[in-house]
Every structure is written in structure tokens, then in C-alpha cells.
Amino acid sequence: MTNLILLSFLRQRPMHGYEIQQLIQSSRMDLWTNILSGSIYYALNKMEQDGLIMAAAEERTGARLRKIYSITDEGEKLFQQMIRETLTLPPHSVKSDFSLGLIWIESIPKPEALELLEQNLRQVEESLAQWRSGKEIKGQYGLSKIAMATFDNAISLLEQDAAFLRNIMDLLQE
């Protein structure tokens, strides 16, 4: 996923790693992609070694030397291939470490289990609020129908997760 994201940015124009990192953070992409700063630089170095991107220029900022990367023809081919592959994947997986933990939830004291579930619910509700806010803010600049559907899907899933957590908490309290 990291390679797909980085290649998509480099298709727009040549950039250095820090600029990509800033774009990911400012767009809030980091909330739903699980991409970390360290993985950006690792992936850029690996993709350069693999010939998917190349250092088009170098920029000196104080004592720091930054490589400005651009996508190669091989990188473009991989980008196209990765899009095709991702479009055949299920939108969400039912495989979940959370579900696995539920199997053995009765192995820990009920008050502790409830507190952990409440903590989880707070996190889901915070994420839900961020997605709703993001949809509203980005909607002011105009969202494509596909982007709107993506926001609606994420919000719906988070609402389902919150309802599921409340249900599990109710069941534990019976």
C-alpha cells in the first residue's frame, strides 16, 4: 500500500520524502492508511533500488541534502498494475484480531473487559467524528461521487463498529 501511495504522489510531480510525508499528514491520509514516516523513506530507497523511481534532483536545505524523486516508466507500470489488483480485493476483511480476542474475553475480569471495550468505543467515536468532519471540510472544496461514497462507507463502517461494541458491552453486563 505504501508503494501505491508514494507512486501516486510522484505521478503528480517530482517530490522529496518530507514533502510526501507532509501531504499525507495534511490530507489526513495517515488516519486510514497506516503509513508511517519511517516506511516512507524505506519505501523510497527500495523503489529507487528497484528502478521504480529515480532521484531527479537533489535539494540542499541547510546541512540536509534531500533527494527529489520522480516516477520511472517501470514505476508507472507497477502503479497501474497495483490499481488493478486493489480493485479486485474485498473492501473490508472479516479477519480481525478483535474478533479473536472476543473468543477469550471471559478469561479476563469483566470490569477490565468493559473498560477496554469502552476505551475502544471512544477511539471509534473519535475516528467517526474525524471522518464526518473530513467529509464536511473536503465537501466544501468539492468531492467526486466516488470520494463521497468512500467517506460514506467509512462512516457507515465506524457507526457499525460503535454499535457492535455497545452490543458486546451490553451482553457482558447481562
Image (cartoon, grey):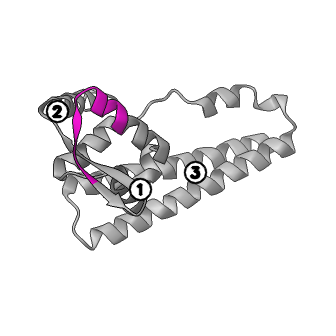
Residue furthest out toward the left: 73
Give the mark nearer the N terminus: 3 vs 2.
2
Instruction: Give the CA distance from mark 1 to mark 2.
Output: 33 Å
Query: Is residue 30 shown above or below 126?
Result: above
The x, y position of residue 6, in whole percent, is: 30, 43
| Rendered-image quadrant of the N terminus | top left
Assess disc 2: are there few (<14), some (14-19) or many (≥20) residues with their C-alpha within 10 Å of its C-alpha.
some
Select label 3 or label 2 by which is in front: 2
Assess disc 1: are there few (<14), some (14-19) or many (≥20) residues with their C-alpha within 10 Å of its C-alpha.
few
Q: Does 15 appear in magenta? A: no
Q: Amino acid at mark 2?
A: Gln
Residue identifier under label 3: 162
Q: Amino acid at mark 3?
A: Ala
Query: Is residue 32 shown above or below 137?
Result: above
Q: Amino acid at mark 1?
A: Arg
The tag on residue 80 is: 2
The x, y position of residue 165, in whole percent, is: 63, 46
Picture quadrant where residue 110 is located: top right
Give the mark nearer the N terminus: 1 vs 3.
1
The tag on residue 105 is: none
Instruction: For residue 174, say whether it is visible.
Output: no
Instruction: Give the CA distance from mark 1 to mark 3.
Output: 45 Å
Give the mark nearer the N terminus: 1 vs 2.
1
Query: Considering depth in this image, is 140 or 31 the residue closer to the camera?
Result: 31
**Badge 2 element:** helix
Q: Which residues are magenta?
A: 44-58
The x, y position of residue 4, in whole percent, is: 29, 37
